[in-house]
Every structure is written in structure tokens, then in C-alpha cells.
Image: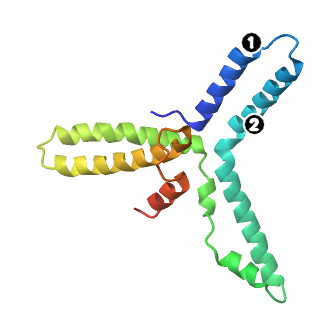
Amino acid sequence: MIPGVTQQLEAIKRTLMASVTPALPADAGFARQQVLLIGAALDFLIECHAHEYRYAVVENTEYRTLLKELAGRASSLPPDVADVLAEQGPAPSDAQLPLQTVTEQTRRMKVLSERLYADVAAGDGADIPAVLDLQAKTAERQVEREASWFRRAGFTMDAPPINVVLGSSAAGA
């Protein structure tokens, strides 16, 4: 399984602190300060990134509510206010589940899918072609997402950007 962003950030921080910092000369005060600043930035990312989407949803919902309330009290509405209120926003329920909860649930679903596949395969075999097709399509979409996610690492540069892949996945493509 591919390590999550938190695991990758934690590995970078461990390497930085365990390998880079001790290798710096004793008189490299400025370099040590820079390493500590990078470490602090990594600590911030480790703590906050998993909550960024939830934060954005909560903030969006609160400002949408405020804007609607203000619009209801205004004598006239500028067109841009009506436009932004007509745009689809995230559902407030999108902010209920922490990222870790979603990823742990997904991991459990992957394990259970394997178990159910084994159960179906142990049966009379009539459903195996359909099950294999379902698994192949799911795996195809997973590979597309992963190739896009890691495209900046240089291995899959021809993959489309992640927002394109996730946008088409969300649309059911």
C-alpha cells in the first residue's frame, strides 16, 4: 500500500533530524536554524494537512450562511453575490469525517473486498467473470489516481493532473 501524506512527511522529518542535522558542522549555526525551520514547517504540515479539506468545508459553509443572511437583509444584491450563492458548495456533512477515518475505512474495504472475492471464487464460478471485471475496473481507476498523484515525482509525468483525474472519477467516468 502506498504511504499516505502524513507517513511521507513524517519520514522526511525523521531523515532530516536523524541524518542531516547531525552531519552539519558545529559552526554551521545558520544551516542548523534552517533545518529547524524546515522541521517546524513539517510539524505544521503533519498536524494540519489531514484537516485541510474539513477546514475548508466548515469555512465555506459558515461564509455561505453569513452571505445568505446578509443578502436576505440587503436592499439590492450585486450580481456577483447572486452568482456565488448559486454556485454549488460542499455539503456540510463533507466535514464530518476526518481524513484518517476515511482512509482507514477504505483500507478495511480493500481487505473485505479480497475476502469476498475469495468467497465468490470458491463458489460455483458463475459470477467470476463479472467479479473480475469489477475488480479490473476498480484497479484501473486506482492506478490512474496513483499515477496522477505521483506524477511530479518524475515516474508518471504523462499522467493528467490529480484534479483532472479526481474530477472525472467524481463524475463517474
Residue 54's disc is: none
> Residue at the location (52% across, 33% down)?
3
Read off the residue under disc 1. 23
Relative depth, front residue between 170 and 98: 170
Disc 2 packing (10 Å; few <14; some 14–19; many ≥20): few
67, above or below 150, in the image: below
Image coordinates of residue 169 in percent, x first then y, are: 45, 58
Total tally of numbered discs in the picture: 2
Image coordinates of residue 141 in percent, x first then y, are: 39, 50
134, above or below 24, in the image: below
Q: CA distance from mark 1 to mark 2?
A: 24 Å
Q: Quadrant of residue 23?
A: top right
Residue 44's disc is: 2
Apparent side of residue 67 relative to residue 135 in the rendered image (left or right): right
> Residue at the location (70% across, 52% down)?
55
Disc 1 packing (10 Å; few <14; some 14–19; many ≥20): few
Callout 1, which amino acid? Ala
Relative depth, front residue between 107 and 146: 146
> Residue at the location (31% across, 38% down)?
114
Callout 2, which amino acid? Phe
User: Do the residues bearing badges 1 and 2 touch, measured as CB atoms within 8 Å?
Assistant: no
Apparent side of residue 84 relative to residue 168 in the rendered image (left or right): right
Image coordinates of residue 97 in percent, x first then y, are: 59, 49
82, above or below 50, in the image: below
